[in-house]
Image (spheres, rainbow, N blue to C red):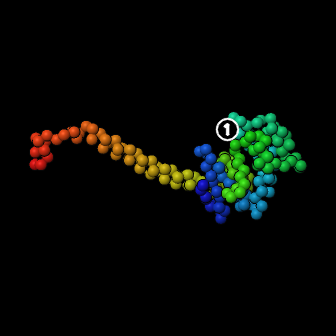
Amino acid sequence: MAKITVQNTNITIINMDGEDYVSITDLARHKSDDPTAVIGNWMRNRNTIEFLGIWESLYNSDFKPLEFEGFRRQAGLNAFTLSPKKWIETTNAIGLISKSGRYGGTYAHKDIAFKFASWISVEFELYIVKEFQRLKEEEQKTLGWSAKRELSKINYRIHTDAIKQNLIPAEVTKAQARIINT
């Protein structure tokens, strides 16, 4: 779990199955003290539903398109409401994660989170993208150092084993011992 700070807002990032998910609950706190209402308003939007549906269609083979169509038809109507949990359960979505308890909140795949950030504010989105890129560059530097260290360790073992097998004879003859001693 990583954290970034953008315009005095702390944002949590988690990694699930090799993919980065950003806390849109934290992003919503930038706009309001009631992040649940902000996320709910965003999810009522027809463009949001279409974006989520297209994203899921691209990346989720278990996505339920018929249920998505039902939400898409209702989106934008005055009485339409949709929570992240209802979206996930009904459509079998993987782009959003709803957690309760400690470290709870709504997390969205980075593609979706950046779209949410742009809905909050274009300026805020730009700062988030830049800070996220900086975080990923730092992680790559750390990974690069660690990978080089592991490769060096493996190479050392290969070299020492090769020396033992090929250069050091099992027994040293008297002639070889004289050469070594001179």
155 or 49, which is in the foreground? 155
Q: Position of residue 12 (x, y in %)?
A: 64, 57
Q: Quadrant of the N terminus?
A: bottom right
| Secondary element type, mark 1 | helix
178 or 107, which is in the foreground? 178
Q: Answer left or right for 156 relative to 66.
A: left
Hey, which residue is sitting farthest right in the picture? 79
Hey, which residue is sitting farthest bottom in the picture? 8
Hey, which residue is sitting farthest front in the picture? 171
Residue occupying image coordinates x 69% and y 51%? 107
Please give the residue where the numbered disc 1 appears in the rendered image. Answer: 59
Residue occupying image coordinates x 35% and y 44%? 157
Residue occupying image coordinates x 59% and y 45%? 18
Q: Answer left or right for 159 relative to 3.
A: left
**Alpha-carbon neighbours of circle 1 within 10 Å: few (<14), some, or many (≥20)?**
few
Q: Could you tell me the amino acid type at mark 1?
A: Tyr
Viewer can see residue 51: no
Count of marks overlaid on the render: 1
Q: Position of residue 115 (x, y in %)?
A: 70, 49
177 or 159, which is in the foreground? 177
Q: Answer left or right for 114 relative to 87.
A: left
